Amino acid sequence: MQPLNNRKLKILLIVEQCNPDWSSVPLEGFNYFKEIYQIADVTVVTHARNQPNLENKGYNVVYISESSAIKQYYKSVASVAMKGRVNWPLYHLLSYPVYAEFDHRVYQAFKQQVLQGEYDIVHAITPMMPRYPYKIIKACQKSNTPFLLGPVNGGIPFPEGFKETAKKESASLNFLRALGRYLIPGYVETYKKASHILAGSTYTFNLLQKLFAIPDDRISLLYENGIENDFLMEVERYQISDRPINLLFVGRLVPYKCADVVIEAIGQLKSSLQNRIKLSIVGDGSEKENLEKMVQDLHLGSQVNFAGWIPQQETVNYYRQADVFCFPSIREFGGAVVIEAMACGLPCIVVDYGGIGEYVTEEAGFKIEPRSREYLVKQVKEKIKILVEDQQLRTQMSVNSVERAKEFVWSNKALKMHEVYESVLESSNTVSDSSNESNKLTSKEFHTA
Protein backbone atom coordinates (compact mmCIF):
# COMPACT_ATOMS: atom_id res chain seq x y z
CA MET A 1 0.00 0.00 0.00
CA GLN A 2 1.00 3.62 -0.59
CA PRO A 3 1.85 5.82 2.40
CA LEU A 4 -1.35 7.23 3.88
CA ASN A 5 -0.40 10.86 3.30
CA ASN A 6 -0.26 10.27 -0.47
CA ARG A 7 -3.67 8.67 -0.94
CA LYS A 8 -7.21 8.48 0.35
CA LEU A 9 -7.92 6.02 3.11
CA LYS A 10 -9.39 2.79 1.80
CA ILE A 11 -12.52 2.02 3.80
CA LEU A 12 -14.86 -0.97 3.84
CA LEU A 13 -18.22 0.35 5.07
CA ILE A 14 -20.75 -2.21 6.26
CA VAL A 15 -24.11 -0.46 6.07
CA GLU A 16 -26.78 -3.15 6.17
CA GLN A 17 -29.51 -0.48 6.21
CA CYS A 18 -28.59 2.05 3.52
CA ASN A 19 -31.34 3.67 1.49
CA PRO A 20 -31.75 7.29 0.30
CA ASP A 21 -35.50 6.94 -0.20
CA TRP A 22 -36.42 5.53 3.20
CA SER A 23 -36.52 7.21 6.59
CA SER A 24 -34.88 6.67 9.97
CA VAL A 25 -31.83 4.36 10.15
CA PRO A 26 -31.65 3.44 6.41
CA LEU A 27 -31.54 7.14 5.50
CA GLU A 28 -28.95 7.86 8.20
CA GLY A 29 -26.82 4.98 6.94
CA PHE A 30 -26.96 6.37 3.42
CA ASN A 31 -26.06 9.89 4.54
CA TYR A 32 -22.98 8.69 6.43
CA PHE A 33 -21.91 6.63 3.43
CA LYS A 34 -22.56 9.41 0.92
CA GLU A 35 -20.41 11.94 2.78
CA ILE A 36 -17.57 9.56 3.71
CA TYR A 37 -17.51 8.54 0.03
CA GLN A 38 -16.45 12.11 -0.84
CA ILE A 39 -13.31 12.03 1.31
CA ALA A 40 -12.19 8.39 1.24
CA ASP A 41 -11.85 5.42 -1.11
CA VAL A 42 -15.00 3.61 -0.04
CA THR A 43 -16.49 0.23 -0.79
CA VAL A 44 -19.92 -0.09 0.77
CA VAL A 45 -21.59 -3.42 1.40
CA THR A 46 -25.32 -3.42 2.01
CA HIS A 47 -28.41 -5.61 1.77
CA ALA A 48 -29.82 -6.33 -1.68
CA ARG A 49 -33.14 -4.81 -0.61
CA ASN A 50 -31.47 -1.40 -1.08
CA GLN A 51 -30.26 -2.04 -4.65
CA PRO A 52 -33.21 -0.47 -6.53
CA ASN A 53 -32.63 2.82 -4.69
CA LEU A 54 -28.82 2.88 -4.96
CA GLU A 55 -27.93 1.49 -8.39
CA ASN A 56 -27.00 3.85 -11.21
CA LYS A 57 -25.77 6.48 -8.74
CA GLY A 58 -22.08 5.87 -9.46
CA TYR A 59 -21.18 4.39 -6.06
CA ASN A 60 -19.01 1.33 -5.48
CA VAL A 61 -21.63 -0.89 -3.84
CA VAL A 62 -21.65 -4.62 -3.13
CA TYR A 63 -25.13 -6.06 -2.55
CA ILE A 64 -25.68 -9.04 -0.26
CA SER A 65 -28.72 -11.10 -1.20
CA GLU A 66 -30.73 -13.27 1.16
CA SER A 67 -31.83 -16.87 0.81
CA SER A 68 -35.38 -17.80 -0.05
CA ALA A 69 -35.71 -19.45 3.37
CA ILE A 70 -34.85 -16.19 5.15
CA LYS A 71 -37.26 -14.25 2.94
CA GLN A 72 -40.05 -16.58 3.98
CA TYR A 73 -38.95 -16.48 7.61
CA TYR A 74 -39.02 -12.68 7.66
CA LYS A 75 -42.60 -12.67 6.37
CA SER A 76 -43.52 -14.84 9.36
CA VAL A 77 -41.73 -12.48 11.75
CA ALA A 78 -43.58 -9.49 10.32
CA SER A 79 -46.94 -11.21 10.62
CA VAL A 80 -46.31 -12.01 14.30
CA ALA A 81 -44.53 -8.90 15.62
CA MET A 82 -45.87 -6.17 13.36
CA LYS A 83 -49.56 -6.98 13.50
CA GLY A 84 -51.46 -3.98 14.88
CA ARG A 85 -49.18 -2.03 17.23
CA VAL A 86 -45.59 -3.15 16.53
CA ASN A 87 -44.02 -5.20 19.32
CA TRP A 88 -40.47 -3.91 18.84
CA PRO A 89 -38.66 -6.05 21.47
CA LEU A 90 -40.17 -9.20 19.99
CA TYR A 91 -39.52 -8.01 16.43
CA HIS A 92 -35.83 -7.38 17.11
CA LEU A 93 -35.41 -10.75 18.80
CA LEU A 94 -37.11 -12.70 16.02
CA SER A 95 -35.31 -10.72 13.31
CA TYR A 96 -31.85 -11.81 14.43
CA PRO A 97 -31.60 -14.78 11.96
CA VAL A 98 -32.26 -12.31 9.10
CA TYR A 99 -29.34 -10.15 10.19
CA ALA A 100 -27.16 -13.18 11.04
CA GLU A 101 -27.35 -14.43 7.46
CA PHE A 102 -26.35 -11.00 6.13
CA ASP A 103 -23.47 -10.81 8.61
CA HIS A 104 -22.21 -14.27 7.68
CA ARG A 105 -22.37 -13.56 3.95
CA VAL A 106 -20.46 -10.30 4.41
CA TYR A 107 -17.78 -12.28 6.25
CA GLN A 108 -17.59 -14.85 3.45
CA ALA A 109 -17.41 -12.17 0.75
CA PHE A 110 -14.74 -9.97 2.36
CA LYS A 111 -12.75 -12.23 4.70
CA GLN A 112 -9.86 -12.79 2.30
CA GLN A 113 -9.61 -9.15 1.29
CA VAL A 114 -9.45 -8.07 4.92
CA LEU A 115 -6.93 -10.79 5.79
CA GLN A 116 -4.75 -9.58 2.91
CA GLY A 117 -4.81 -6.04 4.30
CA GLU A 118 -6.66 -4.48 1.38
CA TYR A 119 -8.49 -1.99 3.63
CA ASP A 120 -7.12 0.58 6.04
CA ILE A 121 -10.33 0.52 8.09
CA VAL A 122 -13.40 -1.69 8.35
CA HIS A 123 -16.32 0.36 9.66
CA ALA A 124 -19.73 -1.10 10.54
CA ILE A 125 -22.36 1.65 10.69
CA THR A 126 -25.78 -0.03 10.83
CA PRO A 127 -27.80 -1.36 12.52
CA MET A 128 -27.30 1.50 14.96
CA MET A 129 -29.07 -0.11 17.87
CA PRO A 130 -26.45 -2.05 19.88
CA ARG A 131 -28.01 -5.47 19.49
CA TYR A 132 -26.02 -7.48 16.90
CA PRO A 133 -22.41 -8.69 16.44
CA TYR A 134 -20.10 -8.44 13.39
CA LYS A 135 -18.30 -11.58 12.30
CA ILE A 136 -15.80 -9.69 10.11
CA ILE A 137 -14.02 -8.59 13.28
CA LYS A 138 -12.33 -12.01 13.31
CA ALA A 139 -10.53 -11.21 10.04
CA CYS A 140 -9.71 -7.70 11.28
CA GLN A 141 -8.05 -9.13 14.37
CA LYS A 142 -5.88 -11.51 12.35
CA SER A 143 -4.78 -8.85 9.84
CA ASN A 144 -4.40 -6.02 12.38
CA THR A 145 -7.00 -4.02 10.43
CA PRO A 146 -8.78 -1.51 12.68
CA PHE A 147 -12.48 -2.24 13.13
CA LEU A 148 -14.83 0.66 13.96
CA LEU A 149 -18.38 0.34 15.16
CA GLY A 150 -21.10 2.97 15.23
CA PRO A 151 -22.44 5.39 16.02
CA VAL A 152 -24.45 2.91 18.07
CA ASN A 153 -27.33 4.27 20.07
CA GLY A 154 -30.14 3.08 22.30
CA GLY A 155 -30.65 0.90 25.34
CA ILE A 156 -32.37 3.62 27.34
CA PRO A 157 -35.25 2.47 29.58
CA PHE A 158 -38.59 4.23 29.90
CA PRO A 159 -38.67 6.96 32.58
CA GLU A 160 -40.00 5.75 35.92
CA GLY A 161 -43.01 8.05 35.77
CA PHE A 162 -44.32 6.54 32.51
CA LYS A 163 -45.03 2.92 33.38
CA GLU A 164 -48.39 2.94 31.60
CA THR A 165 -46.76 4.13 28.37
CA ALA A 166 -44.03 1.51 28.76
CA LYS A 167 -46.70 -1.17 29.09
CA LYS A 168 -48.33 -0.03 25.84
CA GLU A 169 -44.93 -0.33 24.12
CA SER A 170 -44.34 -3.91 25.41
CA ALA A 171 -41.37 -2.73 27.47
CA SER A 172 -41.74 -5.79 29.72
CA LEU A 173 -39.98 -7.73 26.96
CA ASN A 174 -36.93 -5.46 26.95
CA PHE A 175 -35.12 -8.01 29.09
CA LEU A 176 -34.71 -9.99 25.85
CA ARG A 177 -32.22 -7.36 24.69
CA ALA A 178 -30.01 -7.88 27.73
CA LEU A 179 -30.37 -11.66 27.40
CA GLY A 180 -29.31 -11.48 23.75
CA ARG A 181 -26.00 -9.86 24.67
CA TYR A 182 -24.85 -13.12 26.15
CA LEU A 183 -26.73 -15.62 24.00
CA ILE A 184 -25.88 -14.24 20.54
CA PRO A 185 -22.51 -15.65 19.41
CA GLY A 186 -19.83 -12.99 18.95
CA TYR A 187 -21.77 -10.12 20.51
CA VAL A 188 -19.53 -9.51 23.52
CA GLU A 189 -16.43 -10.14 21.39
CA THR A 190 -17.51 -7.42 18.94
CA TYR A 191 -17.61 -4.77 21.65
CA LYS A 192 -14.58 -5.93 23.59
CA LYS A 193 -12.33 -6.25 20.54
CA ALA A 194 -13.46 -3.32 18.36
CA SER A 195 -10.62 -0.87 17.77
CA HIS A 196 -12.98 2.02 18.42
CA ILE A 197 -16.67 2.50 19.18
CA LEU A 198 -18.67 5.61 18.38
CA ALA A 199 -21.58 6.15 20.78
CA GLY A 200 -24.56 8.10 19.48
CA SER A 201 -25.59 9.53 22.86
CA THR A 202 -24.13 10.05 26.31
CA TYR A 203 -26.47 7.42 27.76
CA THR A 204 -25.25 4.76 25.31
CA PHE A 205 -21.64 5.86 25.84
CA ASN A 206 -21.95 5.24 29.58
CA LEU A 207 -23.92 2.02 29.10
CA LEU A 208 -21.32 0.46 26.79
CA GLN A 209 -18.43 1.45 29.02
CA LYS A 210 -20.17 -0.14 31.99
CA LEU A 211 -21.20 -3.34 30.20
CA PHE A 212 -17.90 -4.09 28.47
CA ALA A 213 -15.29 -2.19 30.50
CA ILE A 214 -14.28 -0.18 27.44
CA PRO A 215 -11.39 2.22 28.17
CA ASP A 216 -11.76 5.91 27.32
CA ASP A 217 -9.36 5.73 24.38
CA ARG A 218 -11.53 3.14 22.58
CA ILE A 219 -14.85 4.97 22.69
CA SER A 220 -16.00 8.47 21.78
CA LEU A 221 -19.22 10.43 21.46
CA LEU A 222 -20.59 11.20 17.99
CA TYR A 223 -24.29 12.08 17.90
CA GLU A 224 -26.18 9.73 15.62
CA ASN A 225 -28.18 12.11 13.46
CA GLY A 226 -27.28 14.81 10.97
CA ILE A 227 -28.80 17.33 8.60
CA GLU A 228 -28.42 18.21 4.94
CA ASN A 229 -26.74 21.57 4.38
CA ASP A 230 -29.59 22.83 2.18
CA PHE A 231 -32.04 22.13 5.02
CA LEU A 232 -30.55 25.05 6.94
CA MET A 233 -32.19 28.41 6.57
CA GLU A 234 -31.36 31.87 7.85
CA VAL A 235 -34.48 33.16 9.52
CA GLU A 236 -35.96 36.36 10.82
CA ARG A 237 -39.07 35.36 12.72
CA TYR A 238 -40.54 38.69 13.73
CA GLN A 239 -44.22 37.87 13.99
CA ILE A 240 -47.22 39.89 12.87
CA SER A 241 -49.28 40.22 16.06
CA ASP A 242 -52.60 39.04 14.59
CA ARG A 243 -51.14 35.97 12.87
CA PRO A 244 -51.61 32.58 14.59
CA ILE A 245 -48.52 30.95 16.11
CA ASN A 246 -47.98 27.66 14.30
CA LEU A 247 -46.95 24.72 16.46
CA LEU A 248 -45.64 21.55 14.86
CA PHE A 249 -45.28 17.87 15.85
CA VAL A 250 -43.55 15.45 13.45
CA GLY A 251 -43.29 11.75 14.24
CA ARG A 252 -44.97 8.36 14.36
CA LEU A 253 -48.23 8.46 16.26
CA VAL A 254 -47.34 5.88 18.89
CA PRO A 255 -47.63 6.14 22.70
CA TYR A 256 -44.04 7.08 23.61
CA LYS A 257 -43.87 9.97 21.13
CA CYS A 258 -46.51 11.73 23.29
CA ALA A 259 -48.43 13.75 20.71
CA ASP A 260 -51.32 13.42 23.18
CA VAL A 261 -49.32 15.49 25.69
CA VAL A 262 -49.15 18.41 23.24
CA ILE A 263 -52.89 18.22 22.54
CA GLU A 264 -53.78 18.07 26.23
CA ALA A 265 -51.39 20.95 27.01
CA ILE A 266 -53.14 23.14 24.42
CA GLY A 267 -56.48 22.07 25.84
CA GLN A 268 -55.47 23.44 29.24
CA LEU A 269 -54.56 26.89 27.93
CA LYS A 270 -56.93 29.80 28.33
CA SER A 271 -59.21 30.25 25.32
CA SER A 272 -57.53 33.59 24.50
CA LEU A 273 -54.22 31.73 23.99
CA GLN A 274 -55.83 28.74 22.26
CA ASN A 275 -57.25 31.09 19.66
CA ARG A 276 -53.72 32.29 18.84
CA ILE A 277 -52.45 28.75 18.17
CA LYS A 278 -52.54 26.30 15.28
CA LEU A 279 -51.02 22.81 15.72
CA SER A 280 -50.07 20.60 12.78
CA ILE A 281 -49.44 16.92 13.51
CA VAL A 282 -47.39 15.30 10.75
CA GLY A 283 -47.27 11.52 10.95
CA ASP A 284 -49.38 8.41 11.22
CA GLY A 285 -49.61 5.41 13.51
CA SER A 286 -51.64 3.29 15.88
CA GLU A 287 -52.62 6.24 18.12
CA LYS A 288 -54.13 8.41 15.40
CA GLU A 289 -57.75 7.49 16.13
CA ASN A 290 -57.29 8.11 19.87
CA LEU A 291 -55.64 11.47 19.18
CA GLU A 292 -58.44 12.55 16.86
CA LYS A 293 -60.99 11.67 19.55
CA MET A 294 -59.01 13.67 22.12
CA VAL A 295 -59.09 16.70 19.83
CA GLN A 296 -62.84 16.31 19.43
CA ASP A 297 -63.44 15.89 23.18
CA LEU A 298 -61.35 19.00 23.98
CA HIS A 299 -63.13 21.02 21.27
CA LEU A 300 -59.83 21.79 19.52
CA GLY A 301 -60.96 20.99 15.99
CA SER A 302 -60.19 24.51 14.79
CA GLN A 303 -56.73 24.47 16.42
CA VAL A 304 -55.40 21.02 15.46
CA ASN A 305 -54.78 19.65 11.98
CA PHE A 306 -53.74 16.06 11.21
CA ALA A 307 -51.59 16.16 8.08
CA GLY A 308 -51.01 12.40 7.98
CA TRP A 309 -47.88 10.74 6.68
CA ILE A 310 -45.75 13.07 4.54
CA PRO A 311 -42.79 11.99 2.34
CA GLN A 312 -39.44 12.85 3.94
CA GLN A 313 -38.50 15.43 1.31
CA GLU A 314 -41.79 17.31 1.79
CA THR A 315 -41.70 17.71 5.58
CA VAL A 316 -39.41 20.73 5.19
CA ASN A 317 -42.45 22.70 4.00
CA TYR A 318 -44.15 22.12 7.35
CA TYR A 319 -41.05 23.08 9.31
CA ARG A 320 -40.69 26.34 7.40
CA GLN A 321 -44.31 27.32 7.97
CA ALA A 322 -44.08 26.65 11.73
CA ASP A 323 -42.96 28.83 14.64
CA VAL A 324 -42.43 26.32 17.46
CA PHE A 325 -41.61 22.59 17.45
CA CYS A 326 -43.30 20.50 20.16
CA PHE A 327 -41.85 17.02 20.51
CA PRO A 328 -42.16 15.63 24.07
CA SER A 329 -41.12 12.07 23.18
CA ILE A 330 -40.10 10.26 26.36
CA ARG A 331 -37.77 7.62 24.90
CA GLU A 332 -35.96 9.02 21.89
CA PHE A 333 -32.51 7.87 20.74
CA GLY A 334 -31.94 9.63 17.44
CA GLY A 335 -34.67 12.22 17.11
CA ALA A 336 -33.67 13.49 13.66
CA VAL A 337 -36.86 15.57 13.52
CA VAL A 338 -35.51 17.80 16.28
CA ILE A 339 -32.39 18.63 14.27
CA GLU A 340 -34.53 19.25 11.20
CA ALA A 341 -36.73 21.61 13.21
CA MET A 342 -33.73 23.51 14.58
CA ALA A 343 -32.25 23.78 11.08
CA CYS A 344 -35.44 25.55 10.03
CA GLY A 345 -35.20 27.96 12.94
CA LEU A 346 -37.76 26.48 15.30
CA PRO A 347 -37.46 26.82 19.08
CA CYS A 348 -37.97 23.29 20.42
CA ILE A 349 -39.92 21.96 23.39
CA VAL A 350 -38.53 18.51 24.18
CA VAL A 351 -38.02 16.04 27.02
CA ASP A 352 -34.58 16.10 28.65
CA TYR A 353 -34.02 12.36 28.32
CA GLY A 354 -32.04 10.42 25.72
CA GLY A 355 -30.54 11.89 22.58
CA ILE A 356 -32.87 14.84 21.98
CA GLY A 357 -32.06 16.34 25.36
CA GLU A 358 -28.48 16.67 24.14
CA TYR A 359 -29.36 18.24 20.79
CA VAL A 360 -31.39 21.13 22.18
CA THR A 361 -29.48 23.74 24.19
CA GLU A 362 -31.11 26.12 26.68
CA GLU A 363 -30.58 28.90 24.14
CA ALA A 364 -32.48 27.00 21.43
CA GLY A 365 -35.51 25.76 23.35
CA PHE A 366 -36.89 24.17 26.50
CA LYS A 367 -35.97 20.78 27.97
CA ILE A 368 -38.41 19.18 30.42
CA GLU A 369 -37.60 16.50 32.98
CA PRO A 370 -39.90 13.46 32.47
CA ARG A 371 -41.13 13.11 36.07
CA SER A 372 -44.66 12.03 35.16
CA ARG A 373 -47.22 12.52 32.42
CA GLU A 374 -49.09 15.11 34.49
CA TYR A 375 -45.89 17.08 35.08
CA LEU A 376 -44.99 16.87 31.39
CA VAL A 377 -48.40 18.19 30.29
CA LYS A 378 -48.15 21.08 32.74
CA GLN A 379 -44.65 22.03 31.63
CA VAL A 380 -45.43 21.77 27.90
CA LYS A 381 -48.41 24.06 28.49
CA GLU A 382 -46.21 26.60 30.29
CA LYS A 383 -43.49 26.53 27.63
CA ILE A 384 -46.03 26.97 24.82
CA LYS A 385 -47.50 29.92 26.69
CA ILE A 386 -44.07 31.55 27.09
CA LEU A 387 -43.16 31.17 23.43
CA VAL A 388 -46.55 32.36 22.17
CA GLU A 389 -46.45 35.48 24.33
CA ASP A 390 -42.74 36.34 24.11
CA GLN A 391 -41.97 37.25 20.51
CA GLN A 392 -38.45 38.44 21.31
CA LEU A 393 -37.51 35.17 23.02
CA ARG A 394 -39.03 33.17 20.18
CA THR A 395 -36.97 35.12 17.66
CA GLN A 396 -33.71 34.74 19.58
CA MET A 397 -34.25 31.01 20.08
CA SER A 398 -34.97 30.72 16.37
CA VAL A 399 -31.59 32.20 15.48
CA ASN A 400 -29.85 30.02 18.09
CA SER A 401 -31.56 26.88 16.78
CA VAL A 402 -30.11 27.38 13.30
CA GLU A 403 -26.63 27.95 14.71
CA ARG A 404 -26.90 24.79 16.80
CA ALA A 405 -28.12 22.75 13.82
CA LYS A 406 -25.05 23.73 11.77
CA GLU A 407 -22.98 21.47 14.03
CA PHE A 408 -24.93 18.48 12.70
CA VAL A 409 -24.39 18.97 8.95
CA TRP A 410 -23.57 15.56 7.44
CA SER A 411 -20.40 16.75 5.72
CA ASN A 412 -19.05 18.03 9.04
CA LYS A 413 -19.89 14.71 10.70
CA ALA A 414 -18.02 12.85 7.96
CA LEU A 415 -14.93 15.00 8.56
CA LYS A 416 -15.10 14.16 12.27
CA MET A 417 -15.43 10.50 11.33
CA HIS A 418 -12.34 10.79 9.14
CA GLU A 419 -10.42 12.30 12.07
CA VAL A 420 -11.37 9.23 14.09
CA TYR A 421 -10.11 6.98 11.28
CA GLU A 422 -6.74 8.73 11.25
CA SER A 423 -6.46 8.64 15.03
CA VAL A 424 -7.29 4.93 15.18
CA LEU A 425 -4.80 4.16 12.41
CA GLU A 426 -2.11 6.13 14.19
CA SER A 427 -2.77 4.22 17.40
CA SER A 428 -2.83 0.93 15.51
CA ASN A 429 0.50 1.68 13.82
CA THR A 430 2.06 2.70 17.13
CA VAL A 431 0.96 -0.55 18.74
CA SER A 432 2.20 -2.49 15.71
CA ASP A 433 5.61 -0.77 15.79
CA SER A 434 5.92 -1.42 19.54
CA SER A 435 5.02 -5.05 19.00
CA ASN A 436 7.60 -5.44 16.24
CA GLU A 437 10.27 -3.80 18.39
CA SER A 438 9.38 -6.10 21.26
CA ASN A 439 9.65 -9.10 18.97
CA LYS A 440 13.12 -7.96 17.81
CA LEU A 441 14.31 -7.61 21.41
CA THR A 442 12.93 -10.99 22.31
CA SER A 443 14.66 -12.52 19.30
CA LYS A 444 17.96 -10.78 20.16
CA GLU A 445 17.78 -11.94 23.78
CA PHE A 446 17.06 -15.48 22.61
CA HIS A 447 20.10 -15.59 20.27
CA THR A 448 22.34 -13.95 22.88
CA ALA A 449 21.39 -16.62 25.38
Image (spheres, rainbow, N blue to C red):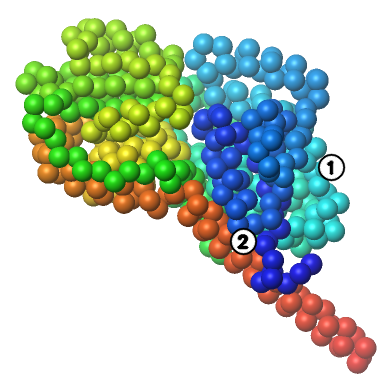
Q: Residue 433 falls in which quadrant of the image?
A: bottom right
- Mark 2 Cα-neighbour bin, 10 Å: few <14, some 14–19, many ≥20: many
Spatial separation of the CA atoms under disc 2 and disc 1: 24 Å
- The x, y position of residue 449, in whole percent, is 92, 91
**Looking at the image, residue 57 lies above or below residue 447:** above
Give left or right: position of 412 versus 101.
left
Q: Which residue is mark 1?
A: 108
Q: Residue 306 falls in which quadrant of the image?
A: top left
Amino acid of disc 2: Tyr
- The x, y position of residue 67, in whole percent, is 81, 25
Mark toward the start of the polypeptide (2 vs 1):
1
Local secondary structure at mark 1: helix
State the residue in front, 162 or 336: 336
Q: Which residue is mark 2?
A: 421
Query: Which residue is painted at 37% across and 8% down in the image?
Result: 289
Query: Which residue is painted at 30% across and 33% down in the image?
Result: 320
Visible in this render: residue 371?
Answer: no
Give left or right: position of 359 versus 270.
right
- The x, y position of residue 161, in whole percent, is 32, 30
Query: Which residue is painted at 54% across and 53% down in the image?
Result: 414
